[in-house]
C-alpha cells in the first residue's frame, strides 16, 4: 500500500482522500485542483492562491530550466521562494513542449535531477504524450519509451520527492490499462493520465471517459490519479466520479487573458454578458460593464479571480456531494450543460460495473432524474443480487399500483422500475427507497425487465408478472418462461 495516500470515502468511483507530500511536510485533501503557474506570467500572485482554496500548485520545470531569468534564482533560493508559495509544488517535465514542438533539449534523468535540485515536491519524468487516434504501432512504440523512462526514474535517488508515473496509450483502452498496470507496478507515487487535453478541447468527453476508465482498471485503489490538463469546472464532477483525484488548471489564467468567463455550465465571453450569473466576490462587487472598462491587467486579474472562485467552488461542491452520497446527481446535472457532456455521462454509465465495486452499499437517498438513472451502479447492484436469489414455487411479481390478479401464489413481490423485483424484506432498504418520478420512462421499465430476467434465470420458480400497462417495447424482453398479465385491461375490455 502507498502510505502517502489515504482514502476517506467513496461515492461511485469518486473518492475523498489525503495525499501526504513528505518533502513539503503537508497533507492535501483530494480531490484537489492545482493552479498552473507560468513563472514568466503570474496572472495571480502564487502567494494569493490559498485565498481561493489552493493547497498545491503545479509549474513547468522545463520552462524554468531553459530560462536565464528564473533558472539561477530557482537553483539558489528554491522553487518555493521563486514562486512565493509555501505549500506543495508539483513540476511537469517538458512533455507538453515535446508534444508541441517535437523535441526538447534535456533528457528525462537530467530534468528529474533538476526538479529535485530546485526543491520540487512531486516531480515528473519526460513521458511521450501520444495524441488521440494515432496508429497503434506509434502508440505502442511511444508507450514503450514512456515505460522505460518510468523504470529509469525508479532507479534514481531523489530523496523525499514524490514521482509521477504518467499513463499514456492514446485512445486504445487496452494500452491505457496496460500502461497503468506497468506504472503502478513501478512503485512510484502519483499516476497522471496524460494526453487527454486534445480530447477535451474537441469536446470528446466520452472518449476521455473511456481512456480514464481503462487506466483505472490497471491501477490499485491506493493510486492517486491526476487528470493532466483537465482545468474546466464543467467536467470536474464527471472526472471525479471516474476516480480522478488531482486536476491542474491553466484555464483560469489563459481564459482570462482571452476575455473568457468560466461557469460550471460552460464558457462565456465577457463581451456577451450583461449580468454575472455568479455570487463570488468579483461578481458581487462588479458588473460586466465595469470589468470591461478596467485597464487590461486589472480586467485579466478580475476574470482570473472569478475563474478561480468558480473552479474551487465546484471542487468543494463535489466533496460535499461525495460526503452526502450525491455525486452522480451532481454529475447528471452537469451533463445537461452540453450534449457532449451528456455523451460523457452515458460513457461513464457504460462502466457502471466498474463504479459499483467502490460505490457505497448504502446512502441517504437516490434520485431518479432521467433515463440515464436506470443505468446507475445501484441498479446494476440490485440486479446482481437478484441473480443470487433462488425463489421456489409460484411467485407473483406485481407492479406497485396494479390490481392483484386472481390466483394462489406462494410469494408476492412488488416490481419497482428501474430495479425490478423487490423481495418484501428489502423494500425499505437502499437503493429501493429511491425517489422516483410518478411518470415512469421507458428506460426504467426496460431496466426492471432486466431485473426480472436475472431473477428468472436464478431459480426454478414459476413467475407471473402482473403489470398495469407497461410499454410493449419493455415487455418484449420479458423471458418466455414468465407469464405476463396486463391488469390495466378489465374483464369488460376483454369481452369487447
Image: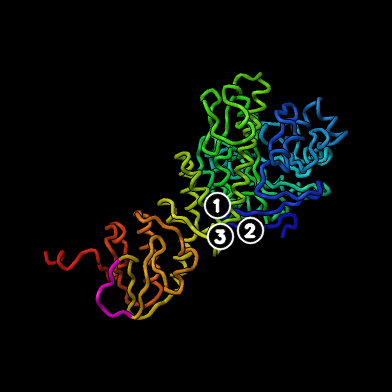
**What residue is disc 2 on?**
9
Crowding at mark 2 (Cα within 10 Å: few <14, some 14-19, many 20+): some
SS class of the residue under badge 3?
loop
- Which percent across, then down, holds residue 462? 32, 76
Crowding at mark 3 (Cα within 10 Å: few <14, some 14-19, many 20+): many
SS class of the residue under badge 1?
helix
State the residue in front, 211 or 203: 203
State the residue in front, 158 or 411: 411
> With respect to residue 269, does 194 lie above or below?
below
Crowding at mark 1 (Cα within 10 Å: few <14, some 14-19, many 20+): many
Residue 403 colored magenta? yes
> With respect to residue 119, does 256 lie above or below?
above
Locate the C terminus by quadrant. bottom left
Residue extending furthest left?
A: 496
Residue drawn at (71%, 55%) of the image: 5
For marks 1 and 3, the one nearer the N-term is 1
**What residue is disc 3 on?**
359
Q: Which residues are magenta?
A: 402-409
Q: CA distance from mark 1 to mark 3?
A: 10 Å
Question: Image check: 410 left or right of 301?
Answer: left
Residue 327's disc is 1
Locate the N terminus by quadrant. bottom right
Picture quadrant of residue 92: top right
Amino acid at each position: 500500500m502507498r502510505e502517502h495516500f489515504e482514502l476517506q470515502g467513496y461515492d461511485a468511483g469518486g473518492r475523498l482522500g489525503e495525499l501526504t507530500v513528505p518533502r513539503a511536510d503537508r497533507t492535501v485533501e483530494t480531490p484537489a485542483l492545482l493552479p498552473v503557474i507560468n513563472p514568466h506570467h503570474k496572472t495571480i500572485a502564487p502567494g494569493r492562491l490559498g485565498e481561493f482554496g489552493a493547497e498545491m500548485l503545479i509549474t513547468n520545470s522545463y520552462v524554468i530550466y531553459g530560462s536565464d531569468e528564473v533558472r539561477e534564482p530557482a537553483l539558489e533560493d528554491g522553487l518555493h521562494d521563486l514562486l512565493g508559495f509555501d505549500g506543495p509544488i508539483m513540476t511537469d517535465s517538458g512533455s507538453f513542449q515535446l508534444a508541441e514542438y517535437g523535441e526538447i533539449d534535456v533528457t528525462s534523468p537530467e530534468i528529474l535531477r533538476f526538479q529535485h535540485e530546485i526543491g520540487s515536491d512531486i516531480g515528473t519524468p519526460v513521458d511521450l504524450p501520444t495524441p488521440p487516434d494515432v496508429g497503434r504501432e506509434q502508440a505502442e512504440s511511444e508507450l514503450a519509451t514512456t515505460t522505460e523512462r518510468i523504470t529509469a526514474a525508479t532507479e534514481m535517488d531523489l530523496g523525499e520527492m514524490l514521482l509521477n508515473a504518467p499513463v499514456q496509450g492514446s485512445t486504445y483502452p487496452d494500452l491505457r490499462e496496460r500502461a497503468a498496470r506497468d506504472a503502478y507496478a513501478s512503485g512510484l507515487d502519483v499516476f497522471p493520465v496524460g494526453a487527454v487535453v486534445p480530447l477535451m478541447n474537441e469536446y470528446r468527453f466520452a472518449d476521455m471517459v473511456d481512456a480514464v476508465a481503462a487506466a483505472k482498471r490497471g491501477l490499485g485503489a491506493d493510486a492517486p490519479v491526476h487528470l493532466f490538463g483537465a482545468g474546466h469546472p464543467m467536467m470536474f464532477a464527471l472526472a471525479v466520479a471516474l476516480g480522478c483525484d488531482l486536476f491542474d488548471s491553466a484555464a483560469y489564467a489563459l481564459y482570462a487573458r482571452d476575455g473568457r468567463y468560466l461557469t460550471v455550465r460552460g464558457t462565456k465571453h465577457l463581451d456577451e454578458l450583461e449580468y454575472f450569473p455568479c455570487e463570488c466576490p468579483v461578481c458581487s462587487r462588479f458588473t460586466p460593464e465595469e470589468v470591461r472598462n478596467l485597464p487590461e491587467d486589472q480586467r485579466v486579474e478580475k476574470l482570473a479571480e472569478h475563474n478561480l472562485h468558480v473552479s474551487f467552488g465546484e471542487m468543494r461542491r463535489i466533496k460535499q456531494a461525495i460526503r452526502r452520497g450525491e455525486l452522480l446527481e451532481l454529475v447528471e446535472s452537469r451533463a445537461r450543460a452540453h450534449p457532449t457532456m451528456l455523451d460523457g455521462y452515458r460513457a461513464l454509465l457504460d462502466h457502471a460495473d466498474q463504479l459499483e465495486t467502490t460505490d457505497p452499499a448504502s446512502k441517504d437517498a437516490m434520485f431518479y432524474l432521467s433515463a440515464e438513472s436506470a443505468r446507475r451502479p445501484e441498479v446494476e447492484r440490485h440486479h446482481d443480487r437478484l441473480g443470487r436469489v433462488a425463489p421456489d414455487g409460484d411467485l407473483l411479481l406485481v407492479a406497485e399500483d396494479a390490481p392483484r390478479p386472481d390466483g394462489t401464489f406462494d410469494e408476492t413481490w412488488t416490481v419497482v422500475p428501474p430495479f425490478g423485483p423487490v423481495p418484501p424484506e428489502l423494500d425499505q432498504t437502499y437503493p429501493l427507497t429511491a425517489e422516483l418520478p410518478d411518470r415512469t420512462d421507458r428506460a426504467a421499465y426496460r431496466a426492471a425487465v432486466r431485473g426480472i430476467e436475472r431473477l428468472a434465470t436464478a431459480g426454478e420458480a414459476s413467475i407471473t408478472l402482473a403489470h398495469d400497462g407497461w410499454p410493449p417495447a419493455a415487455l418484449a424482453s420479458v423471458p418466455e418462461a414468465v407469464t405476463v398479465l396486463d391488469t390495466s385491461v378489465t374483464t369488460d375490455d376483454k369481452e369487447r
